[in-house]
Image (cartoon, rainbow, N blue to C red):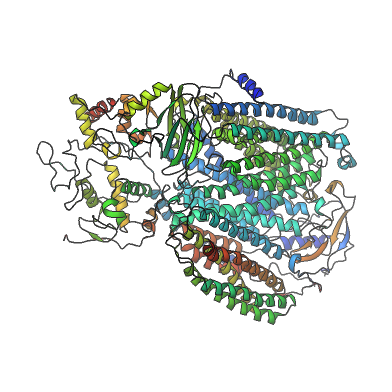
């Protein structure tokens, strides 16, 4: 007796199709907002030179601890550019953060901060921020220097390089998304990479 | 075999499209061997190719008695006559023979241009992302070991031995006119050599994809006579002459107090940065930015002010200098003979 | 009612054929499209998707040629150019060349073997969906600036975590995993179908050369793809959870990547080339109305090519610090592989010599194949020598060589196969006039684009540079190459016009328009869903040319379930019958679940483990019996 | 292009003459006669080759080290791995008995031994969890740790897939038993023999060679 079996369950499957389409459209919607994050993360734009705003003659160039108030050559107080409260151009950019990591190693920041763990300089991975933890404060700390040993890098780094360092330093302490952070370095392993360290978000702490 | 290659190489000289900067216009012993190997293989292949094409052409277009439509079914299946079997057998045998000869020639050429154990000059090349750092490591006395960037002078007629390594990614050290390429691999020390027979300026380029500016990572080999090379070597060893006139001293101050001294070094002054090339004798070099620009004052100014527009992604940032600072800086740098 | 055991002697009466058509048809509409397991519709989809990626890869190449047309051009910056040439390489190698060859196999191997479907129909659907998800994922990432940018070969440490920030290289690694799974699935399909599903009487020496080529390709895939899978797994681990396999400072090794990649890389270009040899054999036999000369020599050459291709991967790494003795071994192996190719070319020429060639478009493309591929083969033998390779590798000389062997050895036979089998797939003939125009434009464009690159290579132009200085003197020849690229672009557009015109409006092609000898010409055009009303019996290697007036067939296969005949490995004696699984949505869902797993593992490495766990449910659903139990016949003396 | 479902036109090919009748051939095949067996062999070759490549990488990276395992890394402890190897070798017996029962079409015997086998596999997976600790190194410590963990991880995915396949078979046998499952169980057995066979050389490589050099 030949048996007709193939087609019986055809009808019930139509409702499945509706469910599948709804799931697919939902996931598409979710996908689009993830995609926009990716575009920002992967941008590689190279900061071409802007006309030099602060044209001042730098004071003596030796790297001694930064005085609280930088004096220009002829004694007038400096017009320190007010830094707007921004996250910095490289906050959400993986390329900028990777360049920040390169500068952190090349300019021997690890000499005092030792890859974020702290040594002569305070640790950068924990949540104790003496001079403020958001981008503008870190920018000021790097350019002006701080009493207690942090030298002023004002004339030693261009503004973009400082912003890259700022973006990288923030990822050391858990700021920003995990997929932005840098992976392991191609040299001896000092600590697990920024990408894989679970660090609590920073908060301000009073100066000792 | 060798004379046959030289004759072939001579035949190729007048071909119009061979420019000066080419592996087919060899001026090094190694590249001469390779060029003659190439011409030997080229003419052999051409002959074989022509024969095969003639056979194919004749097989396809020879006259036949009746049209394909009415080819009888038995004709489709009958085995081919013995002569066709014989021809295919002979052709295969000849192919094997030619290939065997080619392999043997390869071995002899490879042996002929093997890297010599010792050379007149030992140079250690450290390839970095997008420029070349060379250290003349032959001399035992450290003060006599000269280190230069991107422009390497060598004495003519002497074998120069290189030890290649890389600081970051894989690069490839290659001067088409002088020898084949050798990769600089991080974690490895590879050896290369060449001997320039005719003096001249030869252009080399990184040949292994190494990132954003792989295209602008060239270097220059200047092959010159023995005494010119020694004169150049001693001149490069000398520290920078201290500045006297006021304009250049202002430029020096901008250099020392500005961002330049963080990365570049000038022997004889306070600047000791090792991240970028050494600029002690910048003015004596033919090109800047790893062979990207000719070394002229306005090119230097354009490169300092806006490096990221010329080589986007390079480690050299675009500087924020007022035009006055820029002019005095360039004046100072032009003085570094 | 007609008993299932319809008496074997009577011919296929109408009612039987109608029931077969009903049993083998798929549910209507999009749901049917999603759940079908019929090898022809999946293979057709494969070919169309692969060809779309070919067009995308072509556009990337056109943009690159625009940028390189003039020195110091500014059409694209270095970052976009690096993404473009990586996407061009990855698309052409992983998303076009290998999948389209597997797809042609999945379409024609069952037809040529005289069976009704591939061995594992649902696995076939799963393979296609994995490939589709991989390709879509790569291109969605590329359109939001996350396309890989370290070359299709992706050398470490440039592609390592330190020098490739962001998720670009992770996208590349996951795409490789998708396409590799799809290729492996296709390879297992083709091998098992050829071993067990052959029509009775088709012993090993009667298998068509096209099927031999597909089987050799499949074995090459099975041994090559795991190498790139393991390699991309190591890289993905290095980039996500700090392993040090490629970190020179912690004992890792930068050359390890190259060894593993090229151990896969070189067999892969032969995976692309060997099926093309099968296509050339089919076209040469049909268009000269003569059996290919030296069947045994051809089969042994195919196997030799596939075998030797695993022994010469180091010729991609002659410039690396590798011991010289090792390099000379690979020189010998690289030169030796030219012998089997030479034997095949001589056999084809002998076939043309003894046959009566008809110069229609498929044969034109095969003649184009001869002219272009032999040049590429010869430059290949030259590049096999270490001293010459040190001058030529990583320059445009090698770019010229690889395009001559890949376009000449792969794309020319593929276009010939499209023109040859388009009538069988769609029932309509492609127009000869447009075909000739396309051939000559493609042939001329190919030479104008890639022949000058030989000279550019000698002048020291390295590969993968986004621009070059005017002082280098490479400008004029690059302009010529860019013009050639435009000609190729026009010819591909012409092909699309030809396909569009002929898909519905072409001349109606009967079952056997070219009077071919292989079994797919015994079916209607396009073939019925069940391929053959009755499974044919093969009487000789000549196929249709050799069968007597009455086609011998096999009777007794049930028509109310999807039943296929399994035959022994050597002599294809009928051994058992096998009921194939019905259409099902589970392969699509398992592919979707695997897709989500691998993509999420980029952002959260533990995602991969969770996903594998979740994968158990669709897998269980896939294996879940849906039809009620029916009486089975189990032979008493069972093979252990 | 969906072919029309009920094409009335019978393809007018050459007239056909039936020369063979296959209506009485067996529908369930065992061993190399069944295509599922060939499919299993295919995937075993692929996974075996992947593990072989991991072993090749292991010995390739070993050349970069003066001491193997590196100086400050202790050698792997052997207790748990040896126990696990023993349990895996023992677990071949219930698998073989399940396959024999399946071969004899004895559903209850097959089910019984399969359940025993599932228990064995869960025990093996637990032992493997401690096996990772026995390596005495982290995956991100150095190249040694990385390749050792990766190789062990890949083999563990094989174990997990095997266990999942057994559990799936048990579920289907309990609910929707079909004669075809007898053949599937024999193929599953072969897959397990392969996994155990692959583990023996890997065990010597990962756990014993550090003691040899």
Is residue B299 something that shows in the picture? no
Q: Position of residue A26 (x, y in %)?
A: 47, 60
Of A125 and C248, which appears nearest the observer? C248
In the rendered image, which quarter contains the N terminus of chain B? top right
Above or below, comparing residue B231 to residue C241 in the picture: above
Query: How many labels were placed on the picture?
Result: 0
Residue that lies at the very extreme toward the left in this rendered image: A75
Please state if A85 lies on the left or on the right of B170 as rendered.
Answer: left
Dividing the picture into quarters, in which one does residue A121 lie? bottom left
Residue that lies at the very extreme toward the front in this rendered image: B140
Dividing the picture into quarters, in which one does residue A53 lie? top left
Q: Position of residue C356 (x, y in %)?
A: 83, 35
Q: Position of residue C472 (x, y in %)?
A: 47, 26
Please state if B80 lies on the left or on the right of B100 as rendered.
Answer: right
Q: Position of residue B119 (x, y in %)?
A: 48, 32
In the rendered image, which quarter contains the C terminus of chain B? top left
Is residue C412 something that shows in the picture? yes
Of A122 and B2, which appears nearest the observer? B2
Please state if C425 lies on the left or on the right of B309 as rendered.
Answer: right
Please state if C205 lies on the left or on the right of C469 as rendered.
Answer: right
Say which residue appears at 31% left-offset and 28% top-offset.
Answer: B281
Of C44 and D213, which appears nearest the observer? D213
Of C142 and B329, which appears nearest the observer? B329
């Amino acid at each position: 007796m030949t048996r007709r079996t193939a087609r019986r369950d055809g009808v019930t499957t139509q409702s499945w199709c509706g469910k599948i389409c709804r799931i697919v459209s939902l996931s598409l919607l979710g996908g689009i907002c993830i995609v926009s994050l990716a575009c920002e993360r992967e941008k590689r734009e190279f900061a071409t030179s802007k006309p030099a705003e602060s044209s001042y003659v730098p004071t003596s160039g030796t790297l001694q601890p930064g005085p609280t108030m930088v004096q220009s050559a002829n004694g007038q107080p400096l017009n320190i550019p007010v830094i707007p409260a921004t996250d910095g151009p490289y906050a959400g950019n993986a390329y900028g953060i990777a360049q920040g990591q390169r500068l952190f190693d090349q300019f021997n920041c690890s000499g005092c901060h030792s890859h974020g763990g702290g040594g002569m300089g305070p640790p950068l991975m924990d949540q104790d921020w003496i001079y403020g933890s958001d981008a503008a404060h870190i920018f000021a700390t790097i350019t002006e220097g701080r009493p207690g040993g942090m030298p002023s890098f004002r004339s030693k780094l261009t503004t973009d390089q400082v912003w890259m360092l700022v973006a990288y330093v923030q990822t050391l302490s858990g700021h920003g998304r995990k997929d932005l952070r840098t992976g392991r370095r191609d040299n001896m392993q000092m600590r697990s990479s920024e990408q894989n360290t679970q660090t609590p978000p920073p908060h301000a702490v009073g100066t000792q | 075999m060798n004379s046959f290659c030289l004759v072939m190489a001579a035949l190729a000289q007048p071909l119009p499209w061979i420019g000066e900067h080419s592996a087919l216009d060899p001026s090094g012993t190694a590249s001469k061997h390779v060029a003659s190997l190439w011409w030997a293989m080229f003419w052999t292949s051409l002959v074989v190719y022509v024969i095969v094409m003639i056979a194919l052409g004749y097989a396809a277009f020879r006259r036949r008695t009746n049209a394909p439509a009415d080819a009888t079914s038995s004709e489709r299946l009958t085995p081919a006559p013995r002569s066709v079997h014989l021809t295919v057998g002979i052709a295969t045998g000849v192919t094997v023979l030619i290939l065997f000869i080619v392999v043997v020639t390869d071995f002899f050429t490879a042996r002929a241009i093997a890297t010599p154990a010792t050379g007149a000059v030992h140079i250690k090349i450290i390839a970095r992302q997008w420029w070349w750092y060379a250290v003349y490591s032959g001399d035992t006395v450290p003060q006599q070991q000269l280190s230069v960037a991107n422009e390497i002078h060598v004495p003519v007629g002497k074998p120069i031995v290189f030890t290649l390594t890389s600081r970051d990614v894989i690069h490839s050290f290659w001067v088409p006119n002088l020898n084949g390429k050798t990769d600089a691999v991080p974690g490895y020390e590879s050896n290369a050599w060449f001997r320039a027979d005719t003096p001249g300026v030869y252009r080399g380029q990184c040949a292994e994809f190494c990132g954003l500016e792989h295209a602008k990572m060239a270097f220059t080999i200047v092959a010159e006579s023995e005494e010119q090379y020694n004169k150049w070597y001693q001149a490069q060893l000398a520290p920078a002459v201290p500045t006297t006139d006021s304009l250049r001293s202002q430029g020096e101050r901008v250099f020392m107090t500005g961002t330049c001294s963080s990365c570049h070094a000038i022997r004889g002054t306070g600047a000791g940065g090792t991240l970028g090339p050494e600029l002690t004798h910048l003015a004596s070099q033919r090109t800047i930015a790893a062979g990207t620009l000719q070394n002229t004052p306005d090119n230097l100014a354009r490169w300092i002010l806006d490096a990221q527009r010329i080589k986007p992604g390079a480690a050299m940032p675009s500087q924020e200098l007022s035009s006055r600072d820029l002019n005095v800086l360039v004046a100072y740098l032009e003085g570094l003979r | 009612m007609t008993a299932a055991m319809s008496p074997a002697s009577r011919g296929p009466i109408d009612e039987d054929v109608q029931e077969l058509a009903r049993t083998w048809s798929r549910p209507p509409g999009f749901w049917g499209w999603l759940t079908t397991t019929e090898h022809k519709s999946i293979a057709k989809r494969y070919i169309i998707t692969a060809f779309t990626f070919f067009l995308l890869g072509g556009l990337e190449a056109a943009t690159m040629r625009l940028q390189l047309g003039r020195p110091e051009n500014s059409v694209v910056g270095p970052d976009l150019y690096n993404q473009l040439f990586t996407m061009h390489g990855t698309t052409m190698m992983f998303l076009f060349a290998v999948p389209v060859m597997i797809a042609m196999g999945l379409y024609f191997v069952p037809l040529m073997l005289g069976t009704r479907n591939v061995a594992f129909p649902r696995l076939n659907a799963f393979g296609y969906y994995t490939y589709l998800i991989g390709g879509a994922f790569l291109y969605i990432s590329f359109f939001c600036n996350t396309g890989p940018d370290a070359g299709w070969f992706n050398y470490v440490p440039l592609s390592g975590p330190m020098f490739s920030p962001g998720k670009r290289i992770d996208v590349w690694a996951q795409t490789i995993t998708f396409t590799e799974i799809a290729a492996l699935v296709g390879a297992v399909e083709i091998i098992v179908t050829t071993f067990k599903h052959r029509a009775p009487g088709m012993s090993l020496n009667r298998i068509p050369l096209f099927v031999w080529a597909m089987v050799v390709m499949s074995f090459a895939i099975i041994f090559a793809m795991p190498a790139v899978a393991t390699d991309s797994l190591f890289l993905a681990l290095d980039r996500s959870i700090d392993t040090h396999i490629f970190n020179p400072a912690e004992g890792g090794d930068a050359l390890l990547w190259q060894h593993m990649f090229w151990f896969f890389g070189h067999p892969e270009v032969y995976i692309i080339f060997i099926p093309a040899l099968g296509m050339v054999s089919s076209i040469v036999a049909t268009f000269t109305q003569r059996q290919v000369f030296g069947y045994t020599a051809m089969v042994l050459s195919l196997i030799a090519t596939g075998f030797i291709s695993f022994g010469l991967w180091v010729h991609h790494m002659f410039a690396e610090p590798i011991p010289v003795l090792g390099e000379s071994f690979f020189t010998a192996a690289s030169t030796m592989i030219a012998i089997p190719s030479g034997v095949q070319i001589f056999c084809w020429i002998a076939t043309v010599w003894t046959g009566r060639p008809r110069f229609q478009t498929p044969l034109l493309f095969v003649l184009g194949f001869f002219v272009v591929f032999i040049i590429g083969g010869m430059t290949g033998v030259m590049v096999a020598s270490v001293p010459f390779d040190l001058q030529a590798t990583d320059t445009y000389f090698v770019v010229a060589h690889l395009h001559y062997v890949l376009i000449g050895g792969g794309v020319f036979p593929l276009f010939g196969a499209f023109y040859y089998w388009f009538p069988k797939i769609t029932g309509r003939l492609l127009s000869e006039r447009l075909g000739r125009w396309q051939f000559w434009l493609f042939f001329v464009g190919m030479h104008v684009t890639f022949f000058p690159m030989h000279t550019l290579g000698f002048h020291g132009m390295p590969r993968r540079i986004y621009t070059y200085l005017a002082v280098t003197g490479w400008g004029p020849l690059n302009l010529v190459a860019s013009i050639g690229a435009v000609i190729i672009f026009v010819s591909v557009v012409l092909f699309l016009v030809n396909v569009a015109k002929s898909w519905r409006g072409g001349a109606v092609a009967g079952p056997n328009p070219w009077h071919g000898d292989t079994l797919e010409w015994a079916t209607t055009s396009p073939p019925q869903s069940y391929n053959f009303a009755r499974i044919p019996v093969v009487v000789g290697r000549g196929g249709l040319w050799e069968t007597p007036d009455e086609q011998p067939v096999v009777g007794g296969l049930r028509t109310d379930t999807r039943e296929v005949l399994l035959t022994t490995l050597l002599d294809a004696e009928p051994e058992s019958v096998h009921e194939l699984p019905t259409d099902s949505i589970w392969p699509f869902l398992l592919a979707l679940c695997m897709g989500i797993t691998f993509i999420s593992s980029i952002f959260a490495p533990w995602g991969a483990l969770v996903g594998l766990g979740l994968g158990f449910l669709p897998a269980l659903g896939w294996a879940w019996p849906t039809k009620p139990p029916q009486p089975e016949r189990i032979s008493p003396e069972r093979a252990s | 292009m969906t072919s029309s479902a009920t094409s009335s036109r019978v393809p007018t090919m050459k007239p056909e003459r039936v020369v063979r009748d296959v209506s009485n051939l067996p529908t369930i095949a065992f061993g190399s006669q069944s295509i599922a067996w060939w499919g299993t062999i295919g995937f075993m070759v692929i996974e075996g080759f992947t593990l072989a490549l991991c072993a090749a990488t292991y010995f390739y990276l070993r050349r970069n080290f003066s001491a193997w395992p590196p100086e400050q890394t202790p050698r792997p402890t052997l207790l748990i791995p040896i126990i696990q190897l023993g349990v895996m070798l023992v677990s071949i017996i219930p698998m073989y008995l399940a396959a024999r029962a399946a071969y004899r079409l004895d559903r209850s015997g097959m089910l019984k031994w399969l359940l025993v086998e599932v228990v064995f596999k869960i025990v093996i997976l637990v032992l493997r969890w401690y096996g990772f600790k026995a390596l005495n190194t982290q995956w991100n410590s150095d190249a040694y740790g990385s390749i050792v963990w990766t190789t062990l991880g890949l083999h563990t995915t094989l174990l997990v897939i095997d266990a999942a396949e057994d559990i799936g078979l048990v579920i289907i046998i309990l609910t929707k038993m079909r004669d075809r499952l007898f053949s599937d169980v024999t193929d599953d057995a072969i897959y397990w023999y392969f996994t155990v066979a692959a583990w023996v050389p890997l065990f010597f490589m990962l756990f014993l060679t550090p003691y040899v050099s």
